[in-house]
Amino acid sequence: MLRMGSIHKTPYLYHAGPLFALDIGKTSMKLVQLAVDDPAKPKLIGYGSTPFDTDAIKDGVIVKPEIIAEAAKTLFGKNVVGTITTRRCALTIPTFRTFTRTLELPLLNKKELADAVKLEAEQYIPVPLSDLYLDYTINSRTKTGLQVLLAAIPKAIADSYLELAAIMGLEVVLIEPTMSSNSRLFSKDKQSDATSVLIDIGSVSSDISIYDGSMITTGTIDIGGELFTDAIKKGLDVTRAEANIIKTKYGLDKSRRQTDIRSALEPDLQKVIKEIKRLVRYHAEHYGTDRPIKQIITVGGGANMPGLTDYFTDELRLASRALDPWKVIGAHDLQLPAVHDRPMFATAIGLGLVPPKGVFK
């Protein structure tokens, strides 16, 4: 994660306090504020979502912040369930717009580690470091070495998010890739001790990660919920609105047109299967067979398609299930979103689980 006020672990001038999570996707934004005083059951304070015009973002950069800022007025003014009590926020940037890599390094002091991470970044990231914000997190430490997660975000993208926040009057204290937020959410799951494949199915792309106590490696494929809708539209010769209803109501489950739907979706789904298998092989080659992958976990708005997890189970011979992000928090008297809308809040809830004091190191 990139903690604002610095890169490379410089202390902050801010004081710890409440914050809310703001997840800005390609077509919509979601926000969640949690009270994390009780880590066992964080309390939901407020949440909401609103769509915006897709012209606002191009190649990951917010090129028309006024469009999103205007949508945010509606979100904060009319669409918040509960309340948002602060202007301090944490932001996510789509994982496929970032660079992440797990590094195996010897035991090093703080300065040596920062230098080693920089050298690794220069070797593996195909972008000049002067164009990136760079940070790292130590995943694990043994007697002989360190496992470090490197994260780098293009400055053009991060700066566009900061410009939007300034227009909205928000104080940004943290930016991180969406998959980091999803990993934090999954860490609260009762079965998170098993080595798992996490799949975040967004509107236009899917991020796939291997999780074993922390995020080990990540891949991205340009397949998402919108492409599923387009495939059904073309394959079944229906309108886009009808295709979206078919996707969310029937999906791959048994229905009168199950064969036609599966046939339409199969090419895109097989691309997802291929990427999962690639990451599974990578895990086996680099980490051996002591911690075999046990399950597949889906999150994100596209994860609510009926029959999708059964498809993954059949194709990969691994137990698969969708992660309900709302089970790890206490809603108290707040009304939850409709069932089919709940998965899309996974990233925002995962980001909102950051303890405020944990931002300042």
Image: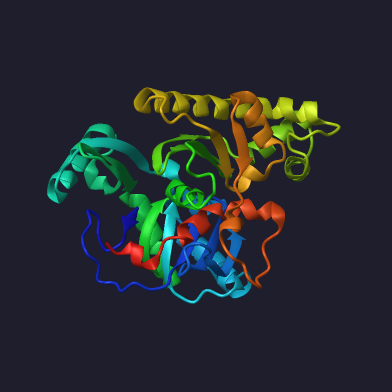
**Residue 62 in view, yes or no:** no
Q: Whole-percent x and y of residue 109?
A: 14, 47
Camera-side residue: 250 or 324?
Answer: 324
Check the image and report above or below for 85 versus 244: below
Q: Whole-percent x and y of residue 282?
A: 40, 26
Camera-side residue: 202 or 214?
Answer: 214
Quadrant in the picture for the C terminus:
bottom left
Which residue lies at the image location 56% right of the left edge and 57% below the top edge? 328
The picture quadrant where one finds residue 284 is top left
Check the image and report above or below for 292 versus 351: above
Q: Whole-percent x and y of residue 72?
A: 54, 67
Q: Whole-percent x and y of residue 256?
A: 86, 32
Q: How is the image coloured?
A: rainbow
Which residue lies at the image location 71% right of the left edge and 36% below the top edge? 307
Which residue lies at the image location 67% right of the left edge and 30% below the top edge? 311
**Residue 91 in view, yes or no:** yes
Check the image and report above or below for 192 versus 342: above
- In the rendered structure, the answer to whether residue 288 lies left or right of residue 120 reads right
The picture quadrant where one finds residue 354 is bottom left
